[in-house]
Image: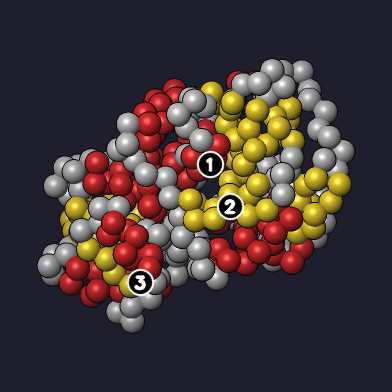
């Protein structure tokens, strides 16, 4: 089978298209023919081995797929790695049945980023009707879904994005206001977008100065949910600051959600149902050939992309 392999850690240039042996399923596993592999910003951390989970070489990146089993079932699944390939062996209990009305593109887009957005809005931020939420990366795969889910929950959404095109996309999806995420004074820009008032929740994925600025926009009992470190700048939180302002900082890593099928099942059902019912739009930015996985990583790191990015292993 064809696959993308990493033999040494680094940037997009370390990913090679290779001919690899077909996976041999262990007991209880099924080999899935991959129709689409999801691309996530976390994959750029995996190829550098600079994120939360330790990686081992050689590595086939990719943490989510949609495809078909040998008996013809349409399925989607998380995988620890190996998604950037034509085939992958998956434990049978991990397989999520895909309804006929859900395309392979949508199925691959609703696992990592759909569940992340759902958990951020509902379980972590616990957004309530009438509250204001700031969503960073609002033009990306997770952000575009979070904007819609927050509006669906009755929230007021302030969308942060780095280009006019992405901010227009967030507005079309329901954002009440937008802010340039590269604003010189991000704190003041967010407060101004909210009529000068502090906000109730922030979904934060970049770290660095943006983290510090966003934290200081929170009202008493406000919640910041951290779901990424795209800047690769780790922040330290002053507990005295949290006490003085009654603010909360919450971390979210999808690994812990995936280990809770009692939570994942209802979330996936809600996401698939919302898409099928026309309540939720999955924005697919681009479907790259497997052979151009390196270009996909170059584009996502350079912030040239919007929506969900996918790989087509047949090309």
Q: Quadrant of the N terminus?
A: top right
Q: Position of residue 216 (x, y in %)?
A: 27, 67
Which residue reaches farthest bottom?
184
Numbered marks: total: 3
Residue 239: assigned label: none
Of the numbered discs 2 and 3, the one sitting upstream in the chain is 3
Name the element at disc 1.
Answer: helix
Q: CA distance from mark 1 to mark 2?
A: 9 Å
Q: Is residue 214 visible?
A: no
- Residue 30 figure quarter: top right
Q: CA distance from mark 1 to mark 3?
A: 25 Å
Q: Is residue 17 left or right of residue 101?
A: right
> Tag 1: Cα neighbours inside 10 Å, few (<14), some, or many (≥20)?
many
Q: Are marks 1 and 3 in contact (CB under 8 Å)?
A: no
Q: Position of residue 313 (x, y in %)?
A: 70, 45
> Tag 3: Cα neighbours inside 10 Å, few (<14), some, or many (≥20)?
few
Residues 26 and 149: in front is: 149
Of the numbered discs 1 and 2, the one sitting upstream in the chain is 1
Q: CA distance from mark 2 to mark 3?
A: 22 Å
Mark 2 or 3: in front is: 2
Q: Are marks 1 and 2 in contact (CB under 8 Å)?
A: yes
Q: Is residue 315 visible?
A: yes
Q: Which residue is mark 3?
A: 164
Q: Is residue 270 left or right of residue 96?
A: left
Q: Which residue is mark 1?
A: 105
Residue under the point 24% across and 69% down: 190
Residues 57 and 14: in front is: 14
Residue under the point 77% across and 18% down: 27
Name the element at disc 3.
Answer: helix
Q: Which residue is mark 2?
A: 287
Q: Position of residue 246 (x, y in %)?
A: 22, 54
């Amino acid at each position: 089978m064809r696959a993308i392999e990493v033999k040494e850690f680094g940037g997009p240039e370390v990913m090679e298209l290779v001919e690899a042996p077909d996976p041999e399923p262990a007991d209880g596993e099924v080999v899935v023919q991959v129709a689409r592999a999801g691309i996530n910003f976390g994959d750029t951390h995996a190829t550098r081995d600079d994120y939360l989970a330790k990686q081992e070489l050689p590595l086939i990146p990719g943490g989510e797929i949609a495809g078909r089993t040998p008996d013809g079932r349409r399925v989607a699944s998380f995988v620890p790695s190996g998604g950037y390939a034509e085939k992958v062996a998956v434990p049978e209990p991990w397989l999520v049945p895909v309804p006929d009305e859900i395309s392979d593109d949508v199925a691959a887009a609703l696992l990592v980023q759909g569940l992340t957005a759902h958990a951020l809005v509902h379980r972590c931020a616990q957004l309530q009707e009438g509250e204001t939420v700031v969503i960073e990366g609002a033009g990306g795969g997770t952000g575009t879904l979070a904007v819609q889910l927050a509006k669906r929950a009755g929230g007021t959404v302030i969308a942060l994005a780095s280009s006019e095109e992405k901010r227009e996309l967030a507005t079309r999806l329901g954002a009440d206001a937008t802010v340039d995420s590269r604003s010189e004074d991000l704190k003041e820009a967010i407060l101004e977008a909210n009529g000068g008032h502090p906000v109730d929740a922030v979904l934060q994925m970049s770290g660095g100065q943006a983290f510090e600025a966003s934290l200081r926009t929170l009202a008493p009992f406000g919640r910041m949910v951290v779901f990424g470190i795209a800047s690769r700048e780790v922040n330290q939180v002053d507990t005295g600051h949290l006490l003085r302002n009654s603010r909360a900082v919450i971390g979210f890593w999808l690994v812990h959600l995936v280990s809770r099928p009692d939570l994942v099942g209802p979330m996936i059902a809600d996401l698939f149902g919302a898409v099928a019912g026309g309540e939720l739009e999955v924005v697919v930015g681009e479907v790259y050939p497997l052979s151009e996985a390196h270009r996909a990583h170059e584009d996502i790191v350079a912030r040239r992309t919007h929506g969900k990015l996918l790989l087509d292993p047949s090309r």
